[in-house]
Amino acid sequence: MSDLLERLRGRGWRMTSQRRVVAEVLGGDHVHLTADEVHARAVERLPEISRATVYNTLGELVSLGEVVEVSTEGRAKRYDPNAHHPHQHLVCSGCGTIRDVHPTGDPLSDLPADQRFGFTVVEAEVTYRGLCPSCA
């Protein structure tokens, strides 16, 4: 069973067949699918699932904090089920492939005090960009 499915069951989330299929499609490492990709894979498992159900389920998962919406410039939003595992993203500027990366160091502590301008910084998002081997 995927980590996402386990977390959802632990929360007591009502597990309909449609919700289960969406959660199963999002399972795995380095999964960053668009809503349309989630729908296409879900239809393979449950042909009657509608696009609206997939979008609604993704919205619920984001609201619950179980999935993170990843936006990259000029591309469709992608959905990352690794919401509870701190990581950053490596994005290919060519094809849009996204990989989870775990750099050493803490981006919060890397921001010097004089650059915080009185803010209490609680979160940092770092996106690394480049070309994947296929696009290079």
Image: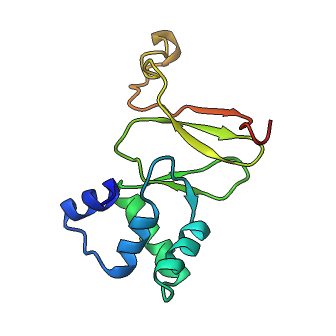
Query: How many numbered dots are placed on residues in this image?
Result: 0
Question: Percent x, y for residue 43?
Answer: 53, 80
Q: Position of residue 19 (x, y in %)?
A: 37, 74
Q: Position of residue 119 (x, y in %)?
A: 43, 24
Q: Quadrant of the C terminus?
A: top right
The reply, left or right, for residue 78 in relation to residue 61 is right
Residue 118 to residue 81: above or below: above
Q: Residue at x 47, y 78 (%)?
A: 45
Residue 15, picture quadrant? bottom left
Who's the residue at 41% across and 47% down the image?
Answer: 82
Tell me if 84 is positioned left or right of 30 in this view.
left
Q: Looking at the image, which is closer to me, 74 or 36? A: 36
Task: Tell me the residue at 60%/57% (across/down).
Answer: 77
Task: Decide which of 62, 95 is in the foreground and name it.
Answer: 95
Q: Position of residue 125 (x, y in %)?
A: 51, 34
Residue 99 vs 64, above or below: the answer is above
Any part of residue 114 in sight: yes
Quarter placement of the N terminus: bottom left
Q: Is residue 105 left or right of residue 129?
A: left
**Rendered view: 84 above or below 31:** above
> Can residue 59 be seen in the rendering of this structure?
no
Residue depicted at 43% across the width and 22% down the height: 108
